[in-house]
Amino acid sequence: CYLTLDKAARNMLVVNYWDATVGVFGVDPATGCLTETRSFYDCNEGRPMRARHDKHVNHSENDANAQQERQADPHAHAVILDKYYGRIAFVPDLGMDTIRQFRYSPEEGRLEPAGSVKSGPEGRRALGPRYIEFHPELPFAYVVNELSSEVSVFEFDRKVAEDLIEHGGSDRQTLRLVQTVKTIPEGYPGQHNTCGRITVHVSGDFVLVSNRGHDSIAVFRAERGPVNTGYLTCTGIHHTRGATPRHFQLDSTGEWLVSANQDSDKICVFHMDLSTGFLEFTGNEYAVPSPNFVCNVPPRGPVAAA
């Protein structure tokens, strides 16, 4: 479901949504091939899963029954390492409404469970954390909650992180919830939407989230002033010109965005205003059967003139 290389590219961290496992595989530095399994953790502790990998999920259906079915088991949806030390792994668990925290040893390729934090406000259910991304400069992380159509903003505590790396334990929470914002308009029924991707713009000025059902990309400004630094303010919600934007990608300049509209069988290109965050459809769209991922690959040589 998700792959992450550590800072030295000596290990690959992997999560599998369907059986909620988290693994670490060694990487041969000469060939780039995977070697041995260095660590393995089962979020469901060996119990049989009730979810079926061969059953299609309609991401525009998000009523109570659909939520209950998707949260019948743990579901590890992603794994990333903290940006400061590369020694704390975070795993959003869509089924359990938590961000699992692991102490990570890159030398041994070992993961050690180190507690968890709820992915949204206490007392809330059916959040469904999908992905987590760190701000490139500020000590903040952003979690997209797929089922509640929200982004939760967390402040990252470096002092607690250092204590966790040094001593371990399960009572040291490195993330502190400071804000939760909706990704869809207030009047739109949440049972007809789930979130897809979240990304932080290369400039650090914006956070973008895709909505499947509302079929849009919500753009938020990341505040940098003396008050509410790292908090989000919505600048606009823009239609993706297609159904179910499972994924989208910005180019290396942060100025051009490609949306993968899975259920419309096409990708669409937008221009992003770097001052306001406004997304303008360029009129360019391309037929692609059920697109679900876009990868930006910089050219290795000079681009020939048209």
Image (cartoon, rainbow, N blue to C red):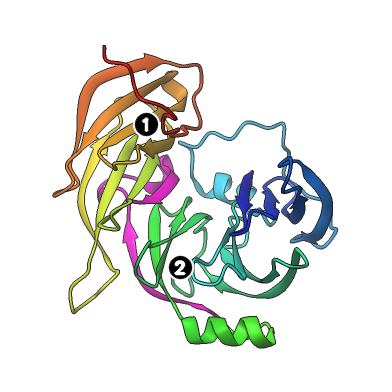
Gap between marks 2 and 1 measured at Cα? 27 Å
Q: Position of residue 104 (x, y in %)?
A: 68, 69
Q: How many marks?
A: 2
Query: Which of 47 and 240 lies nearest the eye of the viewer?
Result: 240
Q: Position of residue 156 (x, y in %)?
A: 45, 75
Q: Pointer 1: what residue? A: 259
Magenta span has 179? Answer: yes
Span colored in magenta? 173-201
Name the residue located 63 percent from the left edge and 47 percent from the top edge. Answer: 3
User: Which is in the foreground here, disc 2 or disc 1?
Assistant: 1
Name the residue located 75 percent from the left edge and 41 percent from the top edge. Answer: 33
The vertical placement of 243 against 272, above or below, is: above
Query: Which of 81 and 31 lies nearest the eye of the viewer?
Result: 31
User: Considering the numbered disc 1 on the image, is that residue within a helix, a strand or a loop?
Assistant: strand
Q: If the image is split into quadrants, where does the C terminus sit?
A: top left
- Three-letter amino acid code of the residue under disc 1: Ser
The vertical placement of 282 against 208, above or below, is: above
Q: Decide if residue 297 is on the left or right side of residue 21.
A: left
Q: Are marks 2 and 1 in contact (CB under 8 Å)?
A: no
Mark sitting on residue 298: none
- Three-letter amino acid code of the residue under disc 2: Gly
Q: If the image is split into quadrants, where does the N terminus sit?
A: top right
Q: Earlier in the sequence, mark 2 or mark 1?
A: 2
Magenta span has 81? Answer: no
Q: Decide if residue 165 is on the left or right side of residue 236.
A: right
Q: Decide if residue 78 is on the left or right side of residue 14.
A: left
Q: Pointer 2: what residue? A: 120
